[in-house]
Image: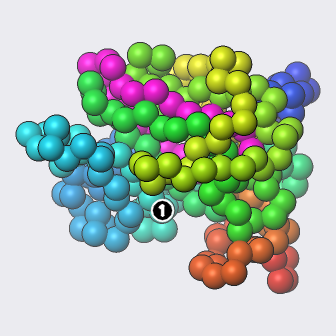
Amino acid sequence: MGLSKEQLEQFQENGFLVIGPLLTEDELAALRSRIDALASGEDPLSARVGIRLEADAEKLKQESKLNKVWQIMDASSYDETIARHARNPQILDIVEQLLGTSDIKLFGDQTLMKPAHHGSPVSWHQDSGYWTQISPPALVNCWTALDDATIENGCVRYVPGSHKRGVLEHHRENDGFLHVRDFDPNQAVPAEVPAGWCAFHHSCTIHSSGPNLSPNRRRGLVTSYMRADSEWVGAIGRKAFPLVRGREYEGRV
């Protein structure tokens, strides 16, 4: 499934694009099952993936472990179902058009969880504000909705066209996260994404998400892609990035 000329132009203009459905019901069910098994601690792989809990532990002390998890990181490095999703040909066909190359590497993956009634908001930021090790700062993120993402349960909000400004200055606040300030949040638009659909966004697009005020869960699985000829400009922490399509480039990521 490729993009039309109009869809490609929309992404280039706005910095994000919602498209789908890209997953079958069986694929969606398999991903939900694996994510919940990792988040709950029921799977032995839970000890290997990165898991971050919601910040307000006191408020959530009566909740199950599953409903305390805020983020699961790098699950594709260990779990075959999630690794297969990161290599989904329909997703890669779109990423190829958005990156402008058939040589693609996976930067990483994360699942962002918003349990019913208490899922936390995410601050306004650009992903490349965190991913400063990669040049050029022009990665493409595929945000796959595992549940319907709505305004009420904390869907992502994007600032159209903000990717054209490059990487902006970010400030680390008391919550430990990076925040970008030099923009008008009134320009943001919500991206409601049905389960099985995907929202693609540029890594310099300013975005955030609100809290989950609904009785329904909101899980989003994000796979992040970069050109295989991207350059590593970080001082430390370089890792091996898996090639998901095309070829390697010597001396590059």
In this rendering, the answer to whether 231 lies above or below 206 is below
- Based on the displayed image, in which of its 4 quarters is residue 98 positioned? top right
Can residue 252 be seen by looking at this rendering? yes
Q: Is residue 120 left or right of residue 60?
A: right
What is the x, y in percent for residue 108?
58, 60
Q: Residues within 10 Å of mark 1 (few under 14, many from 20)?
A: some
Image quarter of the C terminus: bottom right
Q: Is 164 one of the magenta-colored residues?
A: no
Q: Is residue 133 left or right of residue 54?
A: right
What is the x, y in percent for residue 116?
27, 27
Q: Residue at x 88, y 22 (%)?
A: 6
Of all residues shown, which one is farthest toward the left?
A: 62
Q: Residue at x 24, y 43 (%)?
A: 56
- Look at label 1 and name its amino acid: Asp
Region of the chain picked out in magenta, as a range: 204-224
Q: Residue at x 69, y 81 (%)?
A: 235
